[in-house]
Amino acid sequence: LIIFLALVTWVYLINITNFIDGSDGHCSIHVLFFLIGIILISYFKNEYYFSSLLAFTVIPILLIFLIFFNRPAAISFMGDSGSIFLGYIVGYITLERIFIQKDFFIISLFLYPILDCTINLIKKTIKGYYPWARLGDYFFLIPIKNGYNHIKVFYVTIAYSIANLFFYIMQYNYSKLFFICN
């Protein structure tokens, strides 16, 4: 049962990462700050796992792609092959951290994409659409549909990701005080 739930979680995180790749730099920013959170927690705990090595390897690649190619106005787009690869890494790191370290707060590093996609997938299903139907109804796409440009959405995504990273580190520190996680 645990293996089945892990597989479903991994596939779900892969698809979520693929679904949020709809605005210039949006997916890259979320995954970048997720990976930075992994590096910071590994540094604070002084415990390095394979997920730390993955994060350390993918961060420079993602930064180069984001800075030179994918920031607004994007020259190149990630596409399904890039977002599925990043989703695979996010899923692996999440499961590794949950199973090895008992770091259940790792989900909060990727909370916005999880909530955005889950809420919209439920809405689509209730309305009778397939979950993979491209309706452009994700929350991060609403400002773009209302006439705002990708640059404003990009900066809001950065601000939200910085706040999310801060709250994750705070959760980690306070969970140690109250013995919530190891």
Image (cartoon, rainbow, N blue to C red):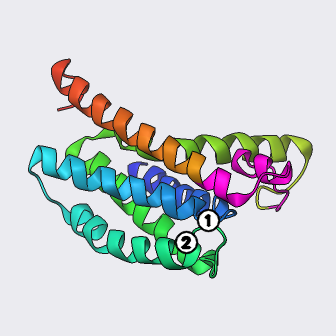
The answer to the question of whether label 2 and label 1 lie on touching residues, with beta carbons closer than 8 A, is yes
For residue 32, the mark is: none
182 above or below 151?
A: above
Q: Nearer the viewer, residue 92 or 65?
A: 65
Q: Residue at x 63, y 78 (%)?
A: 77
Was residue 150 drawn as part of the magenta stretch in this picture?
A: yes
Res 10 seen here: no
Query: Hey, what amino acid is under mark 2?
Result: Ile
Left or right, 39 with reference to 30:
left
Can you tell which quarter of the image residue 27 is in? Answer: bottom right
Circle 2 sits in a helix, a strand or a loop, which is it? helix
For residue 84, the mark is: 2
C-alpha distance separating marks 2 and 1 = 6 Å
Q: Residue at x 28, y 74 (%)?
A: 57
Quarter of the image for the C terminus: give it.
top left
Q: Which residue is mark 1?
A: 18
Can you tell which quarter of the image residue 92 is in? Answer: bottom left
159 above or below 21?
A: above
Question: Which region is colored magenta?
Answer: 133-154
